[in-house]
Each structure stands twice: as structure tokens, then as C-alpha cells.
Amino acid sequence: MSLIKPWPRLRRGLEHDYRVLKVRQDVVADPRTGHEHPRVLIDCPDWVNVIAVTKDEQVVLIRQYRFGTEETTLEIPGGMVEPGEDPGAAAARELEEETGYVPGRVVRLGQVHPNPAIQNNLCHSYLALDCVKQHEGTQDEGEDIAVELHPRSAVTQLLQSGAISHSLVVVAFFLERLHAEAPGSR
């Protein structure tokens, strides 16, 4: 096994702040050759995704327009972790804000790096159980979300058919499966 060395940053580029993320281009040195290379970096806050399940085994999903694909997608609730906020608390907060559902309990499923090639953040996944509808939700300015309930038993078909295609949502369901298969998990 070879040892991979870090690429030292030679120059930090100008940062462009877009509120939800910051973009900059740094210049780094190849540790093998010393040659300089520009690298684009996206500085993002951590994110949370939450698989919300009601007491009668319905999964709370959201449908919203995504500008990158210029399509409406079916996803699980989620959003940004505020500075200093616990990711589990952020998961419960985002669930309630987007859908009006409040969880009975929140279980940590795991975390992934969304795209370590260019991003520095984590996406934390949670399972919210015994969710109860408390209100219609309080969407942020600029959000337009429709809430849908689907039987928990239909999730595999939604994933296999491509009805759910957001990679971080797919990962959350995979982490939930791993959690369910772990000894003493529930």
C-alpha cells in the first residue's frame, strides 16, 4: 500500500460567498513533482437528511424543484446544519420546518462526504420515528415544497424505479438498511 501525501496549498484564491456555500480556486503543489495545479473548492456547511416515518409506517417525502437538473425531485426532508447546531437537532428542525411533522425519536444512521473531490462538508443521515403531523410546516423564503406520504414498503420500488434519484437520499436509505441489519439495532 502506497502512502499518499497531502497536496500543499501554495496560494488561497479569492472567495465568492453565495450564502449557502463559498467557492474559491486555490493553487496546490503535486507532492510527487512539485508542479502547481489550480483546484476549485466549495466550502459548505454540513447537511442533514432525515428519513421520517409515521406511527402507521408511512414515509414522509417531499417533492421540490431542483435547479441543477431543472426537474422536480422526490426526496426526504433535509437542509443545512446551522453553526454550533447538533446535527440530530438540525434533522428534527428541518423535518418540522419543511413538513410540519415532529418526530417521537431521532436515530443517527451515519454520515458521508457528499463530494470530497471539491467539497469539505458532511451529510448526516437520521431516522425519525413515530412522526406526528403538528402543522403545515414553515418553509423558508425561496422554498416550494409539497409533502407526500408513501408506504414504507414502497421505498425499494421508488429507489429501483428512479422515482427517488438524489444520491444523498439514496445513501440515507442505504444507511438505514445497514442500521436495520446491525445486531441489536432497534
Image: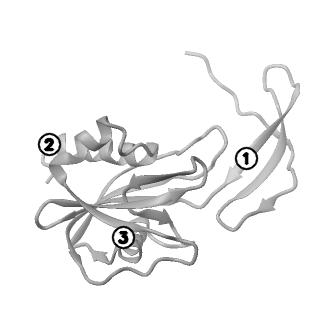
Measured as percent of width and height from the top left, residue 15 is found at 82, 58
Q: Amino acid at mark 3?
A: Leu
* Mark 3 / mark 1, whichever is N-terminal: 1
Seen in the picture, residue 134 relative to 166 is either above or below; the reply is below
Seen in the picture, residue 154 relative to 102 is either above or below; the reply is above
Residue 168 as seen in the image, left or right of residue 30: left
Determine crowd level at label 1: few under 14, some 14-19, many 20+ residues with C-alpha closer than 10 A: some
Measured as percent of width and height from the top left, residue 93 is found at 40, 75
Q: Are marks 3 and 1 in contact (CB under 8 Å)?
A: no
**Residue found at x 12% / y 67%:** 55
Residue position marked by numbered label 1 in the rendering: 41
Measured as percent of width and height from the top left, residue 8 is found at 79, 37
Determine crowd level at label 2: few under 14, some 14-19, many 20+ residues with C-alpha closer than 10 A: few
Residue position marked by numbered label 2 in the rendering: 183
Residue position marked by numbered label 3 in the rendering: 95
Q: Secondary structure at mark 3?
A: helix
Q: Amino acid at mark 2?
A: Pro
Determine crowd level at label 3: few under 14, some 14-19, many 20+ residues with C-alpha closer than 10 A: many
**Residue found at x 51% / y 67%:** 81
Task: Give the spatial CA distance, label 2 vs label 3.
Answer: 28 Å
Task: Tell which of 138 and 25 is nearer to you.
Answer: 138
Q: Which mark is residue 178?
A: none
Q: Are marks 2 and 3 in contact (CB under 8 Å)?
A: no
Measured as percent of width and height from the top left, residue 95 is found at 36, 70
Task: Give the spatial CA distance, label 3 vs label 1.
Answer: 29 Å
* Mark 1 / mark 2, whichever is N-terminal: 1
Q: Nearer the viewer, mark 3 or mark 1?
A: 3
Q: Secondary structure at mark 1?
A: strand
- Looking at the rendering, in which quadrant would you find the C terminus? bottom left
Q: Name the residue furthest bottom.
A: 135
- Looking at the rendering, in which quadrant would you find the N terminus? top right
Q: Amino acid at mark 1?
A: Leu
